[in-house]
Amino acid sequence: MAARLLTLALALAAAGSALADTSIVTWSSSRLTALDAVPTKLRSSKFLDHILNNDQLCDFDAVVLIDQPGTVNRAPSSHIARSISSAVSARSFKLSGSIDLPNAAKSLSNRCGARFLNYSPGPSSSGDVSLEEGKKHVLCLNMPKTQHTSDAETHESTLAAELATISSVFPSHFIIYTGPGLSNLQVRQAPDTIPRPVIDVINNTTQQPVKPSAQNPTTSVFFTTGLITGLMIVFFILLPVLIIGVEALASIQSPTRMDAPKGYNAVEKKNQ
């Protein structure tokens, strides 16, 4: 009975380990627009669909996938942290489930027509690995498992040196890093984009009319209420009075001429 319980416990532990969250940090020398719509928490299958299966990765000269297994929850070295902070684009993700990085890297290299290299960085593999400048590469770096702090320091130093070499050979690169301690990194979650002005359509449709007091002070207003009232008084009151007065004065200065009746002779009237 005890053996069965132990077997069941080990099976549950293995299942829990398989379904454990995976921390991933990505950074690149240029912006990858496919990352903009990807949430920070998602399933590993969705990450494969949105990122690793995206053809935009083929635009880079080198795509590097780093698998750092281990249990030491320690932040990466200062060199890696500086590389992430100084990158043009950097994102961090929390995935539910695990990713088979070697198979994903192999599939990506076939799709992009790139050279595929799967190796463990370090002095033992330096002679077997050669990076060809001017040719696309997909590199899968398998790091040894870290169980102690001293191991983590050694592995991080080796990885930092390898990434420095890759960055110098391939200025255009995209790096995916999985491993413990990534949650301690301060990675910006929003890509660097130029802010665009937002047009508030609702407020514009209900905008109140501008009052005269809010008009531009440099704008001249000619027809005011006082001016219109004054013009009405001049045209409808003062002007008619002036015309009547002029006509009356003219009638006084020019009296009406008296004509003699018909048949009246002034000479005959005098002789009589």
Image: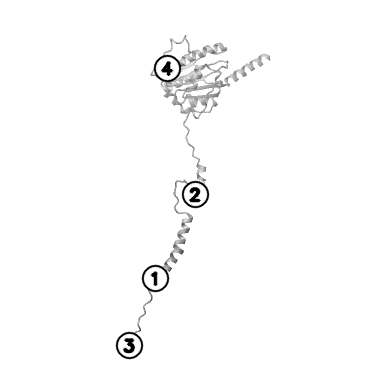
Rendered-image quadrant of the N terminus: top right
What residue is shown with label 1?
Answer: 250
- Residue type beneath disc 1: Ala
- Residue topped by disc 4: 168
206 vs 240: above or below: above
Amino acid type at image mark 4: Ser
Residue ranking furthest to the bottom: 272
Quadrant in which the C terminus is drawn: bottom left
Q: Describe residue 255's horizontal placement relative to residue 213 as left or right.
A: left
What residue is pinned by disc 2?
212
In the image, 210 versus 226, the foreground residue is 226
Image disc number at residue 220: none
Q: Can residue 205 be seen?
A: yes
Q: Is residue 8 left or right of residue 270?
A: right
Q: Residues within 10 Å of mark 2 (few under 14, many from 20)?
A: few
Q: Nearer the viewer, mark 2 or mark 4?
A: 2
Q: Nearer the viewer, mark 2 or mark 3?
A: 3
Q: Where is residue 113 in the image (x, y as percent from the top left)?
A: 41, 21
The residue at 68%/14% (across/down) is 2
Residue name at image x 43 percent, y 64 percent: 239
Q: Choose the circle earlier in sequence order: 2 or 1.
A: 2
Q: Which of marks 1 and 4 is in front?
A: 1
**Residue at (42, 17) in percent of width and height:** 168
Q: Can residue 100 be seen in this view?
A: no
